């Protein structure tokens, strides 16, 4: 995975293997182990102070989305990174698992397509600000 150079506007909340990068790797490992589909990682440096990274993934059904989210929350807890309570249960069209470093959105494919978070968060904010 290619990492972008830090923006002076936003420094990582924690860096290196003890912070956000370690948690990102753990989240990706859990998602891959749960057979999550179309996993996308977005570096939020310079875009938001909500977290350091956003991960977007899909599950093939409501049950799959719920299982991915439950396993991810448990895995994060086992690794010592207590996530906030996942949001989106019991419907499981879109489940959010987050903490101060990594936000993970897990969607059913048609819901993901409708909200299209990748397009919104992968936009080049710096280029748009310079053009104004």
Image (cartoon, rainbow, N blue to C red):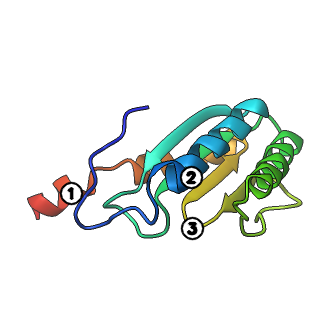
Dot 2 or dot 1, earlier in sequence: 2
The quarter of the rendered structure image containing the C terminus is bottom left
Q: Position of residue 95 (x, y in %)?
A: 74, 56
Which residue of the protein is positioned furthest toward the left in this rendering? Answer: 131
Dot 3 or dot 1, earlier in sequence: 3
Q: Which residue is mark 1?
A: 126
3 vs 1, front mark: 3
- Seen at 69% across and 60% down, the residue is 81
Q: Which residue is mark 2?
A: 115
- Seen at 46% across and 62% down, the residue is 14
Q: Nearer the viewer, residue 40 or 5?
A: 5
Q: Is residue 128 visible to the viewer in this orientation of the structure?
A: yes
2 vs 3, front mark: 3
Q: Position of residue 116 (x, y in %)?
A: 52, 48
Label of residue 100 in the image: 3
Dot 1 falls on a residue whose secondary structure is: helix
Dot 3 falls on a residue whose secondary structure is: loop
Q: Quadrant of residue 29?
A: top right
- Disc 2 versus disc 1: distance between alpha carbons? 23 Å
Q: Position of residue 36 (x, y in %)?
A: 72, 34
Q: Is residue 35 visible to the viewer in this orientation of the structure?
A: no
2 vs 1, front mark: 1
The quarter of the rendered structure image containing the N terminus is top left
- Disc 3 versus disc 1: distance between alpha carbons? 23 Å
């Amino acid at each position: 995975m290619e990492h972008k150079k830090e923006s002076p506007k936003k420094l990582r909340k924690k860096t290196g293997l003890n912070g956000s990068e370690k948690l990102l790797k753990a989240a990706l490992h859990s998602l891959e182990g749960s057979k999550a589909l179309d996993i996308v990682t977005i570096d939020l440096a310079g875009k938001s102070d909500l977290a350091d990274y956003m991960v977007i993934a899909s599950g093939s059904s409501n049950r799959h989305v719920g299982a991915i989210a439950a396993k991810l929350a448990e895995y994060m807890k086992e690794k010592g990174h207590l996530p906030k309570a996942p949001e989106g249960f019991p419907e499981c069209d879109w489940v959010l698992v987050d903490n101060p470093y990594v936000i993970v959105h897990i969607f059913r494919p048609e819901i993901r397509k409708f909200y299209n978070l990748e397009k919104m968060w992968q936009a080049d904010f710096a280029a748009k600000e310079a053009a104004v």
